[in-house]
Image: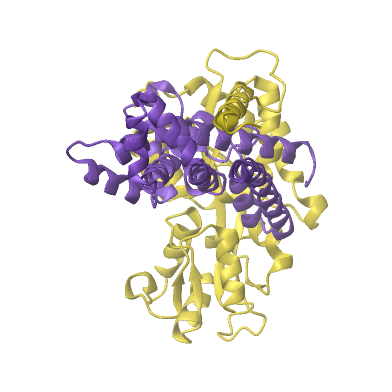
Chain colours: A yellow, B purple
């Protein structure tokens, strides 16, 4: 190769690459009847994505309706913020109190109960704070605080973090404002937070689904479960088109209808049974918030 | 999931996005870096400092900035580019353009200044002179290209923010690694990491081969 042709060759190679990039196509086939506005932005929590549930449900929805779903998995705080600013069309989230605030402020139009799973408090098998078999979650946290055992908090304004803070309210301790040394804020997703808790032999509050998915990598045992306050309830919310005219309200409604449909609910009930021997989520579309003690 | 169709699709998408972003960075950065190295105009050293600072831009900050622009609530929301490969390319160009520009300027300034005088003396036009200088500095210029490519194929913060890590649409190797780590699939995450390293190595190997062929002649 002549020296003078070096740059030319390089530029040619680049232009071939550029032309090869013309069509970044989806690996999936186009659905039968594409709706007028086919793109739907679903803002949801990391737990629904990390558990693999959305990998099952989203393709089903796309196949049935022809919508293309852009799933953005963030903390519930960020998901609610996306709705507030009109950057999402539909939400699948689990922070009932914050959800209601958004409904009252008119940023979301509809809110439907979809399913629940539960939170559990996990920790090292040695259980230095002696919380095992404590049926009241607040008492367990109080024991952790008074023994100053390490506790890892999400600290990221997620649904799990909000739940943790609401349980601390039932104790006389306020570690999130006092910031004692034993209270570790990870600022990361549930999977990463569980790893940190495991490495530091600390306690943490987690949703059952993420814990089961990560279990084999962790030295953590389920220590507290079954308290009514540990219920983790998921709602679908549609963003209000009167506030944000650009949102895809038809798509959001179609998604809400799909999530509450009995066939979808049956899929949710079966999800994870084959892999973990127990379901990860429990369908609730036929119930009301009051049935789950939320009102 | 390793070596199945989905991994192949993710790998191809990663390569397409980062190659296109690097190509665009070269397209803008090479002339701009040349101007900064050879030009004489006010604010030249200020602009050079800006570019050199930009070489250390945190990808997540670039991602947040681009996302704020492209969100529906942002000024460019009507373009509907958020959560598309195009959005990732825009962010990656912002990340790699200062790298290519800064290293281009450094490469040209390292040349013997008498070379320019000599070329003028021989009657070279402005365009011919720049072409000759690029040829002379081709080794560090290719290194600049490799650094630009390396800065984008390996970044995760911006791709996550503006791409959204959407399956089959904007999931690239780095965001897939974050996802699999979050799921607790450390084995898959490490396998994807090795795949990413192999691809980066192959691209750099090809570029180095071109570079060293040039060096021998």
Decide if residue B166 is on the left or right side of residue B38.
right
Position of residue A155 relative to residue B27, above or below, is below
Foreground of the two, A149 or A72: A72
Foreground of the two, A21 or A247: A21
Decide if residue A210 is on the left or right side of residue A266.
left
- Residue A75: give x, y in percent of width and height: 48, 50
Count of residue discs: 0
Any part of residue B22 in sight:
yes
Q: Residue furthest front?
A: B122
- Residue B153: give x, y in percent of width and height: 57, 44
Q: Residue furthest left?
A: B42
Q: Residue at x 37, y 70 (%)?
A: A176
Decide if residue B124 is on the left or right side of residue A23.
left
Position of residue A146 relative to residue A121, above or below, is below
Position of residue A264 relative to residue A199, above or below, is above
Any part of residue B90 in sight:
no
Position of residue A103 relative to residue A46, above or below, is above
Q: Residue at x 64, y 77 (%)?
A: A133
From the image, which quarter does the C terminus of chain B lie in?
top right
Foreground of the two, B129 or B180: B129
- Residue A181: give x, y in percent of width and height: 41, 80
Q: Place residue A114 in its image quadrant.
A: top right
Q: Residue at x 56, y 19 (%)?
A: A38
Q: Place residue A205 in its image quadrant.
A: bottom right
- Residue B146: give x, y in percent of width and height: 54, 45
Foreground of the two, B148 or B124: B124
């Amino acid at each position: 190769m002549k020296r003078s042709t070096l740059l030319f060759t390089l530029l040619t190679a680049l232009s071939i690459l550029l032309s090869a990039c013309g069509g970044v196509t989806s690996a999936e086939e186009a659905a039968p009847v594409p709706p007028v506005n086919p793109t739907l932005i679903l803002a949801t929590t990391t737990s629904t994505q990390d558990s693999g549930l959305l990998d099952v449900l989203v393709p089903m929805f796309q196949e049935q309706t022809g919508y293309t779903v852009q799933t953005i998995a963030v903390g519930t705080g960020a998901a609610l913020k996306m709705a507030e600013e009109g950057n999402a069309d539909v939400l699948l989230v689990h922070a009932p109190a914050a959800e209601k605030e958004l409904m009252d402020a008119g940023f979301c139009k509809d809110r439907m109960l979809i399913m629940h799973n539960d939170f559990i408090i996990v920790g090292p098998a040695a259980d230095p704070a002696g919380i095992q078999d404590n049926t009241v979650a607040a008492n367990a946290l109080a024991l952790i605080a008074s023994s100053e055992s390490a506790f890892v908090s999400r600290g990221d304004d997620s649904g799990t973090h909000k739940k943790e803070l609401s349980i601390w309210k039932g104790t006389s301790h306020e570690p999130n404002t006092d910031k004692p040394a034993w209270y570790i804020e990870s600022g990361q997703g549930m999977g990463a937070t569980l790893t940190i808790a495991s490495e530091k032999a600390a306690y943490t509050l987690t949703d059952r689904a993420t814990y089961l998915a990560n279990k084999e990598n962790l030295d953590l045992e389920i220590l507290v479960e079954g308290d009514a306050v540990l219920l983790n309830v998921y709602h679908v919310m549609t963003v209000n088109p009167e506030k944000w005219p650009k949102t895809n309200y038809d798509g959001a409604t179609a998604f809400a209808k799909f999530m509450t449909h009995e066939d979808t609910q049956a899929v949710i009930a079966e999800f994870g049974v084959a892999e973990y021997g127990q379901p990860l989520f429990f369908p609730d579309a036929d119930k009301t918030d009051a049935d789950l003690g939320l009102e | 999931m390793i070596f199945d169709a989905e991994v192949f699709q993710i790998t191809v998408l990663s390569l397409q996005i980062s190659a296109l972003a690097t190509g665009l960075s070269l397209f803008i950065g090479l002339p701009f870096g040349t101007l900064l190295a050879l030009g004489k105009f006010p604010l030249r050293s200020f602009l050079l400092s800006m570019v050199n600072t930009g070489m250390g831009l945190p990808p997540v900050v670039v991602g947040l900035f681009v996302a704020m622009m492209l969100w529906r609530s942002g000024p460019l929301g009507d373009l509907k580019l958020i959560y598309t490969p195009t959005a990732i390319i825009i962010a990656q160009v912002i990340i790699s353009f200062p790298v290519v520009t800064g290293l281009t300027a450094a490469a040209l300034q390292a040349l013997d200044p008498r070379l320019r005088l000599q070329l003028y003396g021989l009657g070279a036009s402005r365009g011919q002179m720049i072409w000759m200088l690029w040829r002379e500095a081709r080794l560090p210029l290719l290194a600049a290209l490799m650094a630009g490519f390396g800065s984008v194929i390996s970044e995760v913060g911006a791709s996550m923010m503006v791409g959204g890590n959407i399956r089959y649409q904007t999931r690239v190797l780095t965001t897939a690694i974050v996802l699999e780590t979050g799921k607790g699939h450390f084995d898959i995450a490490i396998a994807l990491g090795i795949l990413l390293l192999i691809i980066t190595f192959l691209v750099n190997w090809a570029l180095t081969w071109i570079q060293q062929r040039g060096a021998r002649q």
